[in-house]
Image (cartoon, rainbow, N blue to C red):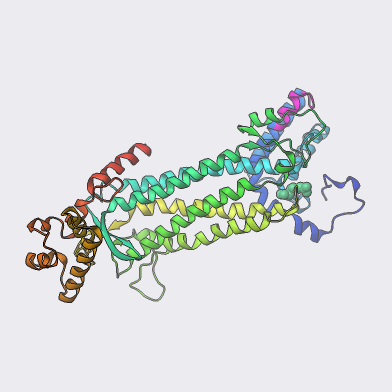
């Protein structure tokens, strides 16, 4: 049985059930790389201030590097008695180096060590998620040229509203994922503050140099208050919240495309490799990947709540509750990464059903707002124009026709400002062509957006 690092004041062994209940190695082994990197920086700092000789520090750094490989190859047996990854690595170091290994933990505690590891881990996770977000943006951007001539009905309340060019949809998603990227970049500012050397909660009497270890680890700042460090998980909560917004964006996109893939809509054909069949209904082709992206968002969102409950009401400073934080972190990160990995090829490869979309574009009065704006252009006050077009729509509904089918004489009866040039704004193609305000869904503004993203995503 492995001796406990904290065993000095204990006479007997820990109850095996307690070991099983309190272990975290089954999940925190994922911090191995970060832990070794953090310990190597700590050892170098200890040598710089004279708490280790440079030979001792070199030995420690080299052995830790070797242990990194051992763990990466899956050759380190994990033992419940050793509780967590930090104890596993330290005890292996001590096994190899004896007294030199026993010096590594000088001037630090597992509390600042865990926090350091988590920050190093989250820093990498942010870089990874950011890369996946860019890939997804590229996927949406990549279809803009191809879909430039496709007009789609835009909806509010899932009721036909106004037409837009298809790339307007694709670039709307790019915007959402861009804000997600900005949030991650902002979160990184708090992640990049070094906890190392805050020790258990109060710092240490030893002459450590926290700025040196921070510098070695690429942190941009050093945390000012050791009590705060020992209890702080804000950075993780922020990160997981940022992931939950990505999940929300992915879930809305999935929902939209699931609807578009239905027989009722028929706007979209998903690549066969990204759909599945039914075990009983031979004709079925189901959008399971999109449904699971929508479904898995629940896990990411739940992780935010899990962390909020975890930190709520904890007295300063470290409490063992915090060990549970990693479960929420890994669940949220793994889930988002998996969703983004699949979202990108799906977003790039799905095909718009152009004929089907076009065949129904004249339904739903997508040109009504443009007719109203035509009247405004003729000097009719907006509210009066709105009312006039509303009445014309009601007339069309009773005649089962479109606005463009109403004879000019009838239009002029509704409003004497209307002249023959009205035909230029009626019909969906004319309506979308008329859109020209900055950020709108017409051709020129959409081309402007495409140029922006081409530059941005280079
Ligand atoms: N396994 C623990 C965790 O992950 C290590 C920290 C233990 N610190 C302590 N004071 N017992 O949170």
Q: Is residue 43 magenta?
A: yes
Instruction: Give the number of marks.
Output: 0
Residue 363: percent from left, percent from top: 21, 67
Q: Does the magenta stretch include residue 274?
A: no
Decide which of 76, 298 is in the foreground and name it.
298
Outermost residue, right side: 11
Residue 377: percent from left, percent from top: 18, 53
Q: In the picture, residue 225 is in which quadrant?
A: top right
Residue 189: percent from left, percent from top: 57, 38
Q: What stretch is highlighted in magenta?
A: 42-53
Q: In this view, does 162 lie to the left or right of 124?
A: left
Q: Residue at x 25, y 49 (%)?
A: 146
Residue 327: percent from left, percent from top: 64, 55
Q: Is residue 62 visible?
A: no
Decide which of 421, 310 is in the foreground and name it.
421
Q: Please tell me whether residue 429 is drawn above or below residue 125 in the rendered image.
A: below
Q: Please tell me whether residue 242 is drawn above or below residue 383 in the rendered image.
A: above
Q: Can residue 321 be seen in this view?
A: yes
Q: Which residue is drawn at 46% across and 61% down?
A: 294
Q: Residue at x 26, y 45 (%)?
A: 445
Q: In this view, does 104 lie to the left or right of 433?
A: right
Q: In the picture, residue 51 is in which quadrant?
A: top right
Q: In this view, does 293 lie to the left or right of 316?
A: left
Tell me the quadrant of the picture where the C terminus can be found: top left
Q: In the picture, residue 359 is in which quadrant?
A: bottom left
């Amino acid at each position: 049985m492995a001796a406990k690092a904290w065993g000095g004041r204990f006479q007997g062994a820990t109850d095996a059930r307690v070991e099983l209940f309190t272990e975290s190695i089954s999940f925190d082994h994922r911090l191995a790389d970060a832990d070794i990197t953090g310990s190597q920086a700590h050892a170098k700092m200890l040598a710089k201030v004279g708490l280790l000789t440079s030979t001792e520090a070199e030995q420690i750094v080299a052995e830790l590097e070797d242990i990194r490989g051992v763990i990466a190859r899956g050759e380190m047996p994990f033992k419940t008695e050793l509780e967590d990854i930090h104890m596993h690595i330290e005890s292996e170091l001590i096994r190899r180096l004896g007294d030199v290994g026993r010096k590594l933990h000088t001037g630090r505690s597992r509390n600042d060590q865990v926090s350091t590891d988590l920050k190093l881990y989250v820093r990498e996770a942010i870089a990874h998620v950011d890369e996946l977000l860019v890939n997804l943006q590229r996927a949406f951007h990549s279809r803009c040229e191809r879909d430039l001539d496709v007009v789609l009905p835009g909806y509010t309340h899932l009721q036909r509203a106004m037409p837009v060019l298809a790339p307007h949809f694709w670039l709307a998603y790019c915007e959402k994922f861009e804000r997600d990227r900005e949030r991650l970049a902002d979160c990184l500012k708090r992640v990049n503050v070094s906890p190392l050397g805050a020790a258990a909660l109060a710092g240490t009497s030893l002459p450590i140099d926290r700025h040196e270890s921070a510098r070695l680890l690429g942190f941009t700042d050093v945390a000012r208050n050791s009590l705060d460090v020992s209890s702080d998980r804000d950075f993780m909560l922020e990160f997981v919240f940022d992931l939950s917004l990505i999940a929300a964006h992915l879930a809305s996109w999935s929902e939209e495309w699931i609807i578009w893939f239905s027989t009722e809509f028929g706007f979209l054909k998903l690549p066969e490799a990204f759909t599945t069949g039914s075990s009983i209904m031979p004709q079925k082709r189901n959008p399971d990947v999109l449904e699971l992206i929508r479904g898995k968002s629940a896990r990411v969102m739940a992780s935010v709540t899990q962390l909020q409950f975890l930190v709520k009401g904890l007295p300063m400073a470290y409490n063992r509750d915090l060990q549970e934080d990693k479960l929420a972190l890994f669940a949220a990160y793994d889930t988002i990464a998996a969703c983004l990995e699949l979202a990108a090829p799906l977003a790039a490869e799905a095909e718009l059903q152009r004929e089907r979309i076009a065949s129904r574009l004249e339904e739903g009065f997508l040109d009504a707002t443009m007719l109203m704006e035509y009247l405004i252009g003729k000097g009719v006050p907006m509210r009066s124009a709105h009312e006039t077009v509303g009445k014309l729509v009601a007339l069309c509904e009773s005649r089962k026709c479109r606005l463009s089918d109403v004879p000019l004489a009838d239009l002029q009866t509704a409003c004497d400002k209307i002249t023959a040039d009205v035909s230029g704004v009626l019909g969906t193609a004319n309506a979308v062509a008329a859109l020209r305000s900055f950020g709108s869904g017409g051709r020129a503004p959409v081309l402007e957006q495409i140029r922006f993203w081409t530059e941005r995503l280079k």
